[in-house]
Amino acid sequence: MTTPNILLVDDEKAVRDATAQSLLLAGYAVETFGSALDALPKITAEFAGVVISDIRMPAMDGLEFLQRILSIDRDLPVILISGHADVATAVSAIRKGGYDLLEKPFSNTQLVEVVKRASDKRRLTLENRALKEALANQTRPGPRIIGQTPGIMNLRKMITRIATVNADVLVWGETGTGKELVARSIHEQSQRRNHNYVAINCAAIPASLLDSELFGHEAGAFTGAKGKRIGKFEHANGGTLFLDEIEGMPLTTQAPLLRVLQERKIERLGSNKLIPLDIRVIAATKVDLKDAAERAEFRKDLYYRLNVVTLEIPPLRARREDIPLLFQHFVLIAAARCETEVPPLNSQALHVLMGHDWPGNIRELRNIAERYVLLGEAYNFDLATLMNAGDRLEGLSLTEQVACFEKTLLVQALNHHQGNTRAVMEALDLPRKTLTDKLKKYGLEREQFRE
């Protein structure tokens, strides 16, 4: 039997049957009841549909039924049916939480249109709840690998499995997939969590300085070495060292790195003293190191030494089902940081998110989520336009980008306070003249924000 997505309550059988027939022809699964008391046990917070109820009924009328429903789930759409004499009562009920009102006699077109809107609203409500619940289920301390696709679930299992083993790890993934997040997650779940987690980008440091950064040096070890320096290996002793973009490490540094990994001892530049290390090394790369080794761009012996345990992070395009969850996560973080309301996420925005290829992976998605929070209102929360606007923003000067951001904050504050300039002044901590000048600069008039 098809699960009903419409609960229809009316004590008049003829009206009940005719209304149900119209909804069945429109493709809805309908369950009918002659009284609200019979329908009430079917109402749950998980009900994925809409309730339609007459107002005048014996035992429990539609208004009491509405209040009972809203006490179970305040977001469940309830469409009320009223006779002409009940309009004033029904309007009051709408203000108390009813979704919409159908006044008898109503047409089939009117009925189906209202039910479609209510059904869409219910679907979005439940989708947003599911996203928030999935996020809440992953609230353990430390960094979280968010997602429910098989690849990500397997990655989390692998992280948990290897976290307590003192094996070095190689993390492979495209740019922006979250390689450092994986490294931090391994560290936080390991017995080393109370010791240092130290990260270094091997490709971002000049070759002439990388040895000193990694291994440290003694005073006078080379020109400019005025004092002793503790390197990243020594600083991470007892904890975890994360070597990001290891494919960018010069071959001259790879040889001493291999020795450290094999012997678990470090020797500062300019020193003859070996310092024992208790350390886990996690290396990350966006290229195939085996291929790089075959081309003599990476040491084969170092590759095989690092390749004890390899974790591969799937690109975002290979885990599209996780995109809404991740986007909601980043939107919540951005809204909290900006101390602003969480913007709405409609079905059109979800369609845009799912259709994009995300060449920048998680990093790109996070940037879009932050832009959605900061600039969404200025673009009427049209995500496709906002994403294209982002390309234009990246070509603007710093002054132009600051002006765009400033205008967005003003629009948000004016909308929130319905054009009340005193409230906006207090919210943004602006003197009256400054606010007036900025409104004039951006062509904003407070009257357009008043309801």
Image (tube, helix red, strand yellow):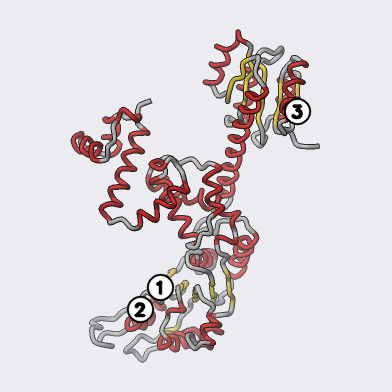
Report helix, strand or loop for mark 2: helix
- Give the amino acid at mark 2: Glu
- Give the amino acid at mark 3: Glu
Depth order, front residue of 256/32: 32
- Give the amino acid at mark 1: Ile
Residue 289: image location, x then y, percent: 53, 80
In whole angstroms, how far apart are the C-alphas of marks 3 and 2? 70 Å
In whole angstroms, how far apart are the C-alphas of marks 1 and 2? 9 Å
Is 427 placed left or right of 20 in the picture? Answer: left
Q: Which mark is residue 213?
A: 2
Q: Can residue 280 be seen in this view?
A: no
Report helix, strand or loop for mark 3: strand
Q: Report the residue that reaches farthest toward the left.
A: 433
Q: Residue at x 36, y 38 (%)?
A: 412
Label 1–label 2 contact, CB within 8 A: yes
Q: Residues within 10 Å of mark 2 (few under 14, many from 20)?
A: some
Q: Mark 1 sits on what residue?
A: 200
Depth order, front residue of 256/346: 346
Label 3–label 1 contact, CB within 8 A: no
Q: Is residue 24 above or below residue 92?
A: below
Is 267 placed left or right of 138 in the picture? Answer: left
Residue 133: image location, x then y, percent: 58, 46
Disc tally is 3
Q: Mark 3 sits on what residue?
A: 31
Q: Is residue 393 above or below residue 165?
A: above
Q: Can residue 288 be seen in this view?
A: yes
Residue 366: image location, x then y, percent: 46, 55
Dot 3 or dot 2: first in sequence order is 3
Q: Residue 150 carries which label?
A: none
Q: Report the residue that reaches farthest toward the right.
A: 1
Q: Residue at x 60, y 26 (%)?
A: 70
